[in-house]
Image (cartoon, coloured by chain):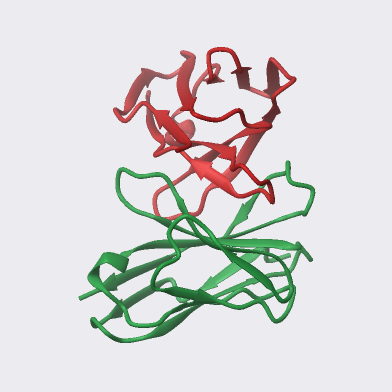
Chain colours: A red, B green
């Protein structure tokens, strides 16, 4: 079955450093991959989408890479701030389309001043 | 522009009771879906709809019913609540193009005792 893995342990970094989160997937070749941010008690909020034919996507301090050979996406936050502290979710489109997403369990990021 | 609105935010049910979780969106999106989120697990798809009058099962549909009489509304019904349905439920909507972001509601935290 289609499976997504994200680092289950929280990532703790110092303010100003670059945070790198990993998303690995198996048994599938998705057409695109999405990253969401989720704050406690809130719904996920879309951040970035990258397609299978794109190697890298950037938005302000965010960068996403997509390696279809390694079946991996990396999500980077440069010049991190305490306000970036949240859980970050990776999501892939499910086979059959219709934007039915498969989500990873998420990685919690804590940025310390 | 309210986006996706879910009600109620919190609910406690007794085993065997039934209830309906409400979801409404004002973005004229064709696609709507329901997910549940449990600790340590990714969001899992319960049911989805690609338009008014059309619904289908997701990954974990047992114990839940849906209907889509209008584009705006997509209620989720628990027929006979069980403790295993204790979870946080999220409704999402998307454009029909299949590779665009999903907009999520704030979630309903349901406890079945």
Corner quadrant of residue B64: bottom left
Q: Is residue A16 above or below residue B67?
A: above
Name the residue nearer the viewer: B80 or A110: B80
Q: Quadrant of the C terminus of chain A?
A: top left
Residue plotted at (48% across, 41% down):
A103
Residue A54 drawn at (x, y percent): 73, 19
Q: Is residue B60 above or below residue A110?
A: below
Residue plotted at (48% across, 32% down):
A84
Name the residue nearer the viewer: B13 or A96: A96
Name the residue nearer the viewer: A107 or B74: B74
B44 with respect to A9 (left or right) = right
Residue A27 drawn at (x, y percent): 50, 29
Give the tally of numbered discs: 0
Q: Quadrant of the N terminus of chain A?
A: top left
Residue plotted at (40% across, 29% down):
A6
B33 with respect to B27 (left or right) = left
Q: Is residue A31 above or below residue B95?
A: above
Residue A20 drawn at (x, y percent): 47, 17
Residue A75 drawn at (x, y percent): 54, 22
B61 with respect to B92 (left or right) = left
């Amino acid at each position: 079955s289609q499976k997504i893995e994200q680092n289950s342990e929280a990532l703790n970094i110092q303010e100003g450093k670059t945070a790198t989160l990993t998303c690995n997937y198996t048994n599938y070749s998705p057409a695109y991959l999405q990253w969401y941010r989720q704050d406690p008690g809130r719904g996920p909020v879309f951040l970035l989408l990258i397609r299978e034919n794109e190697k890298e996507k950037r938005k302000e301090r965010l960068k996403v890479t997509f390696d279809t050979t390694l079946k991996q996406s990396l999500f980077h936050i440069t010049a991190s701030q305490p306000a970036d502290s949240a859980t970050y979710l990776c999501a892939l489109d499910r086979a059959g389309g219709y934007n039915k997403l498969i989500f990873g369990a998420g990685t919690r990021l804590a940025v310390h001043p | 522009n309210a986006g996706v609105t879910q009600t109620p935010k919190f609910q406690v049910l007794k085993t065997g009771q039934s209830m309906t979780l409400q979801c409404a969106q004002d973005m004229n999106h064709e696609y709507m879906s329901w997910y549940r989120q449990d600790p340590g697990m990714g969001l899992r798809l319960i049911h989805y709809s690609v338009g008014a009058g059309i619904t289908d099962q997701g990954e974990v549909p047992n114990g839940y019913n849906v209907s889509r009489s209008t584009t705006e509304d997509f209620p989720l019904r628990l027929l006979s609540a069980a403790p295993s349905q204790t979870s946080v439920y999220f409704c999402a909507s998307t454009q029909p193009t299949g590779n665009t972001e999903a907009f999520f509601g704030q979630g309903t935290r349901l406890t079945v005792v």
